[in-house]
Image (tube, rainbow, N blue to C red):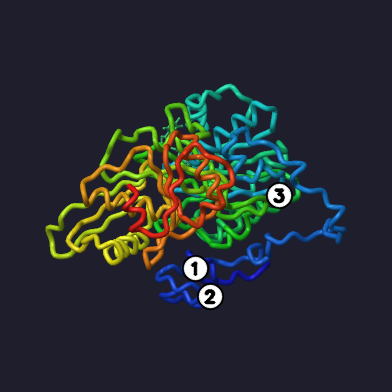
């Protein structure tokens, strides 16, 4: 019988220390150390793939994953996964509560089961009846799919051995536990051990496992960081709960690019794919609004047109307020400073609110010029032509800097019916094709402001 040893484990990073402390030595977080019993099984590292089947092979003899990928039945999800599901991969999906993780995975499970794939959906958060009700809402109540409400990971693994599914969905990893450990479900050791045991069976039996993971207030997946290192693919499902727009983003993908995003809207009967995000984002655009300018950003490999809105009002209190939603706060503050210094706009006594419309988050500097123009428009209470689009990064000297993939952006603007596009002047030579839209190249913000 192995001797049980007590260790303290950090809930944030999973680091172990023999003694309790108020602050974790490894990640510096406070009050995160919890006591747990370290039994023999937990010391045996189940994450490592050891065994007789590990022998060196020649690289050129290994069969590539691409040939054996299969479709998840949801185009936008395939795109984010790098083309489809790879057998044996483990995917972690994180996101705020209520964003639609369970809905997305159940929808995928239904599609796959319809196509004759063996699927097991294990839930620790809902009853089988609740899942049934949800599947009725998703019009998939009569598919042949295995369903189990269970939190014991060892039992789940025994079901996997019986049923031998090709796809497994675990909702969620934080509810799983093994009786071999003394700790409570959701604790670092339980999450790590459960995921480790599942990973082992995923790799040996070539089944793809999708784990739902809860997200902490700070936005990281609750539980040990090691979870994100263990899995092959980490996806975040984001969007705000007041808006139906949802974006699935890959933050790690061993089998594809992390640049891709999948776009959905949450509807009455589940998630709907948005094939044309630009049309969706511009659908509610007002005829001639003051302070509104559209820009073209690149999300993954796709151009997406986003409306930027600004509202400037005179400051009532001593310090002017600045608020942003969907665009970077610091970047906007910098752009306002440039406008004040280089274009002579007096913004020191103005409250400024700058939003990206539609629940999308714009992180690209290519949106700078549109932010500039929308602030200018709001300050002077003048409308900017509805058919004008602005692309360009703004530098500290007021210069408009080149952006990547200009052809894609301009082509999207043309497709969506814009008449003219303001772009950085040193991008104009990259436009080799003839476009129907008028191309206006500008060198600095003063030139851009004079063109509108
Ligand atoms: P859910 O998938 O349960 O979120 P998560 O698993 O990420 O916590 O999504 C729940 C939300 O989605 C809930 O607020 C209701 C909404 N919803 C719809 O609008 N339509 C639907 O068809 C379904 C199933 C859910
Ligand atoms: Mg859920």
Distance CA(mark 3)–CA(mark 1): 27 Å
Q: Secondary structure at mark 3?
A: helix
Please state if 417 lies on the left or on the right of 63 as rendered.
left
The answer to whether the beta carbon of the residue marked 1 is less than 8 Å from any atom of ligand 1 is: no
Q: Position of residue 227 (x, y in %)?
A: 58, 58
Q: Residue furthest left?
A: 316
- Which of disc 2 and disc 1 is earlier in sequence? 1
Q: Residues within 10 Å of mark 3 (few under 14, many from 20)?
A: some
* Image-quadrant location for residue 53: bottom right
The reply to whether discs 3 and 1 touch (Cβ–Cβ < 8 Å) is: no
Q: Residues within 10 Å of mark 2 (few under 14, many from 20)?
A: some
Q: Is residue 403 above or below residue 382?
A: below
The reply to whether discs 1 and 2 touch (Cβ–Cβ < 8 Å) is: yes
Front-lying residue, 392 or 243: 392
Front-lying residue, 382 or 133: 382
Residue shown at 41% from the left, 64% from the top: 395
| Residue 10 - label | 1
Q: Residues within 10 Å of mark 1 (few under 14, many from 20)?
A: many
| Residue 17 - label | 2
Distance CA(mark 1)–CA(mark 2): 8 Å
Residue tagged 3: 201
Residue shown at 55% from the left, 56% from the top: 191
Front-lying residue, 431 or 292: 431
Please state if 229 lies on the left or on the right of 420 as rendered.
right
- Which of disc 2 and disc 3 is earlier in sequence? 2
Residue shown at 59% from the left, 67% from the top: 38
| Residue 405 - label | none
The reply to whether discs 3 and 2 touch (Cβ–Cβ < 8 Å) is: no
Distance CA(mark 3)–CA(mark 2): 29 Å
């Amino acid at each position: 019988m192995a001797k049980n040893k007590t260790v303290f484990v950090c809930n944030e990073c999973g680091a172990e220390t023999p003694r309790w402390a108020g602050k974790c030595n490894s990640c510096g977080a406070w009050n995160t150390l919890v006591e747990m019993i370290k039994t023999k099984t937990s010391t045996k590292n189940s994450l490592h793939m050891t065994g007789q089947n590990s022998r060196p092979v020649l690289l050129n003899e290994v069969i590539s994953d691409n040939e054996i990928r299969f479709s998840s039945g949801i185009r936008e999800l395939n795109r984010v996964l790098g083309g489809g599901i790879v057998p044996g991969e483990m995917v972690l999906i994180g996101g705020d509560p209520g964003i639609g993780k369970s809905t997305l995975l159940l929808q995928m499970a239904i599609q796959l089961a319809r196509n004759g794939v063996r699927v097991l959906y294990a839930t620790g958060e809902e009853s089988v009846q609740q899942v049934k009700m949800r599947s009725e809402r998703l019009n998939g109540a009569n598919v042949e799919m295995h369903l189990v409400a269970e939190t014991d990971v060892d039992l789940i693994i025994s079901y996997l051995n019986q049923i031998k599914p090709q796809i497994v969905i675990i909702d969620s990893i934080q509810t799983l536990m093994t009786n071999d450990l003394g700790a409570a479900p959701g604790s670092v050791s339980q999450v790590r051990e459960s995921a480790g045991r599942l990973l082992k069976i995923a790799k040996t039996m070539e089944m793809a496992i999708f784990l739902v993971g809860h997200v902490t207030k700070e936005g990281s997946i609750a539980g040990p960081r090691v979870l994100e290192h263990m899995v092959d693919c980490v996806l975040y499902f984001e969007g705000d709960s007041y808006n139906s727009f949802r974006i699935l983003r890959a933050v790690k993908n061993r089998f594809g690019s992390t640049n891709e995003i999948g776009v959905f809207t949450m509807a009455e009967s589940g998630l709907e794919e948005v094939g044309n995000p630009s049309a969706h984002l511009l659908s509610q655009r007002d005829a001639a609004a003051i302070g509104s300018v559209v820009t073209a950003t690149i999300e993954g490999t796709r151009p997406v047109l986003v409306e930027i809105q600004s509202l400037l009002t005179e400051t009532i209190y001593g310090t002017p307020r600045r608020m942003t939603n969907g665009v970077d706060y610091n970047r906007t503050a910098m752009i306002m400073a440039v406008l004040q210094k280089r274009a002579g706009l007096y913004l020191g006594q103005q409250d400024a609110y700058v939003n990206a419309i539609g629940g999308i988050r714009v992180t690209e500097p290519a949106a700078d010029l549109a932010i500039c123009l929308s602030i200018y428009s709001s300050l002077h209470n003048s409308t900017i032509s509805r058919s004008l689009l602005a692309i360009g990064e703004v530098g500290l000297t007021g210069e408009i800097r080149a952006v990547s993939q200009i052809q894609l952006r301009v082509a999207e603007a043309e497709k969506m019916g814009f008449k003219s596009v303001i772009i950085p002047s040193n991008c104009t030579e990259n436009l080799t094709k003839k476009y129907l839209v008028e191309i206006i190249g500008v060198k600095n913000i003063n030139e851009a402001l004079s063109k509108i």
